[in-house]
Amino acid sequence: MTEWEYETLRPPRGPTQKETSDPKAELNELGAAGWELVTSVEYAGGGTKFLLFKRPVDGEPE
């Protein structure tokens, strides 16, 4: 059975609490380290609170 480890990324926010910049660089870094995007956790009023990633425990070190 595969064991998983998890990581979260909080997208940058401005004064309105909405995402203000593209987290592409951070996403590419996580992808290169073997992390796979699983889902996003959103605020009730809209906007992304966290992006959730997973990779097998024996994945690349951070």
Image (tube, grey):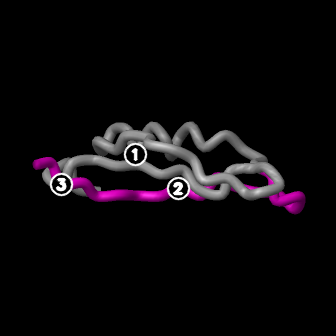
Q: Secondary structure at mark 2?
A: strand
Per the image, the residue denoted by label 3 is 3
**Residue 15: horizontal and vertical position, in percent?**
87, 62
Q: Are dots 2 and 1 in contact, CB under 8 Å?
A: yes
State the SS at label 3: loop
Query: How many discs mark residues in the rendered view?
Result: 3
> Which amino acid type corresponds to the residue marked 2 in the rendered image?
Leu
Q: Residue at x 45, y 37 (%)?
A: 28
Seen as rendered, the residue at the extreme left is 1
Residue found at the very far right of the displayed protein? 16
Residue indicated by mark 1: 30
Q: CA distance from mark 1 to mark 3?
A: 18 Å
Residue 16 highlighted magenta (yes or no): yes
Q: Between marks 2 and 1, how big is the CA–CA gap?
A: 9 Å
- What kind of residue is marked 1? Leu
Query: What is the number of the mark on residue 9?
Result: 2
Q: Which is in the foreground here, disc 2 or disc 3?
A: 3
Identify which residue is drawn at 40% across, 58% down. 7
- Image point 79% across, 50% down: which residue? 46
Query: Is 23 or 35 nearer to us in this picture?
Result: 35
**Range shown magenta:** 1-18
- Compared with 14, 32 (above or below) is above
N-terminal of the two: label 2 or label 1?
2
Measured as percent of width and height from the top left, residue 41 is found at 60, 53
Residue 13 painted magenta: yes
Based on the displayed image, in which of its 4 quarters is residue 62 positioned? bottom left
Q: Residues within 10 Å of mark 2 (few under 14, many from 20)?
A: some
Residue 6 at x, y percent in the picture: 35, 58
Left or right, 39 with respect to 34, comes to: right
- The first of marks 1 and 3 along the sequence is 3
In the rendered view, does 62 fall on the left or right side of 56? right
- State the SS at label 1: helix
